[in-house]
Amino acid sequence: MKEILLLKYGEVVLKGANKSVFENAMVRDIKRKVADCGNFSVSRCQSTVFVEPLDDFADIDGALEACKKVFGIVSICRAAVCDKDMDSILKTVKEYIPEYLTGCRTFKADAKRSDKKFPLKSPQIAAEVGGAVLSAAGGIRVDVKNPDIVVMVEIRETSAYVHAGKIRGAGGMPQGSSGRGLLLLSGGIDSPVAGYMMAKRGVEIEALHFESFPYTSERAREKVFELARILSGYTSGIKVHVISLTKIQEELKNNCEEDYFTLLLRRFMMHLAQRVAELYNCKAIITGESLAQVASQTMQAIAVTDAAVDMPVFRPAIGLDKEEIIRIAREIGTFETSILPFEDCCTVFTPRHPRTKPELEKVMAQENRVDFATLADEAFQSMYTVEIKP
Ligand code: ATP
Ligand code: MG
């Protein structure tokens, strides 16, 4: 029996004159993501994207998994395709639906008819479909209020589609439809989640990682590339720029008061991030900060770091608890990699008593003890880029 995937849009449905821009972005993303699964045609009609295998070798299970990572799609139906007449529809229901009913005690039949020329109305179709389900499967009964499963027939332009329920899609806005942002990617739990959250809102992600060789190791760097690889499954490729902070950290250690190390380092990071963002046409910086999580994430500390840049800084995890961040990290598959125990540059030379209510003037006075411009230039010139593919 021929199967197809029907992908339903989320918020994009509400768009006005520019709706097709978002739809096209989604179709492009889907095409790219199912390309590895064989020959598929991807087309759209009536706020649905149709992903249709073109030969027997096309891997529909793989395509379904790939489509779960497409932003902008809220639900996916795996459906059997049949002709638009009641005989074919009922035959398909009887053959296709029983395997989905295992473990279900109740069901509801439903129908949607976007082809208004179809001779039966939706309630009539649903009644016949319900009868077909009852005759094909024993021991199941109808419950229209709270069914275990909904058996659905959709009558559309060229064919009818029979399916048994929706699978949750990734939600959000189509990939790249919100422009490009630069994610500050460490090896921790929070920053990959922050990147995912912004990618979900349609931001194309480019990443910047700071290392501090030899204080941080080769394996710490590999871990970050692995996190980028997992994220790239959602975005279809991420460039990771890497900058060394070794000299900056040593200069700060030798010249500034210990209590200010982290803040001073974070200001260097933000300054460098802005330069990278400008170079690669990113319109915002993204970090994994969460309010009050650590000393450098108090309101005052965030104000001091923000003062080092003049572009928007997105912190999507700012209002999330660690538990909530971890839940997302598990869902998107980054958690297990994030907890591998490797040093981050932020954990090198950490102050024993970091300032939690810093004043910008005092921070600036400390910053003036080093040659900020030269150190930043040198660090910026040390940058190299690795392209990560899913
Ligand atoms: P995570 O890195 O997951 O947030 P964390 O909470 O330990 O773990 P912090 O040291 O609090 O990280 O850093 C806050 C944010 O600063 C990170 O979310 C990340 O966006 C950025 N950041 C920290 N270290 C680095 C790094 N080595 N390279 C790039 N960005 C970093
Ligand atoms: Mg954090």
Image (cartoon, rainbow, N blue to C red):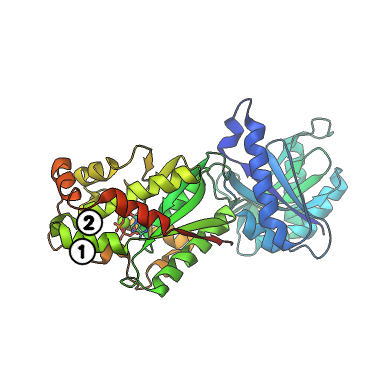
Determine if the C-beta at disc 2 is less than 8 A from ligand 1.
Answer: yes
- Whole-percent x, y for residue 181 in the image: 47, 45
Report helix, strand or loop for mark 2. helix
Residue for point 33% across, 58% down = 323
**For residue 343, above or below residue 127:** below
Residue for point 61% across, 26% down = 16
Residue for point 69% across, 57% down = 34
- Whole-percent x, y for residue 332 in the image: 48, 59
- Whole-percent x, y for residue 37 in the image: 72, 62
Left or right: where 161 falls relative to 151: right
The mark found on residue 181 in the picture is: none
Residue behind mark 1: 350
Q: Residue 350 appears in which quarter of the rendering?
A: bottom left
In which quadrant of the rendered image does the C terminus lie? Answer: bottom right
CB under 8 Å between discs 1 and 2: yes
Residue behind mark 2: 262
Q: How crowded is mark 2: few (under 14 residues within 10 Å), some or many (20 or more)?
A: many
- Whether residue 108 is visible here, answered yes or no, is no
Q: Residue 62 appears in which quarter of the rendering?
A: bottom right
Callout 1 amino acid: Thr
Callout 2 amino acid: Thr
Q: In the depicted view, which residue is nearer to us: 265 or 229? A: 265
Report helix, strand or loop for mark 1. loop
**For residue 302, above or below residue 213:** above
Left or right: where 347 falls relative to 70: left
- Whole-percent x, y for residue 245 in the image: 33, 61
- Whether residue 384 is visible here, answered yes or no, is yes
Q: In the depicted view, which residue is nearer to us: 43 or 10? A: 43
In which quadrant of the rendered image does the N terminus lie? Answer: bottom right
Determine if the C-beta at disc 1 is less than 8 A from ligand 1.
Answer: no
Quarter for ligand 1? bottom left
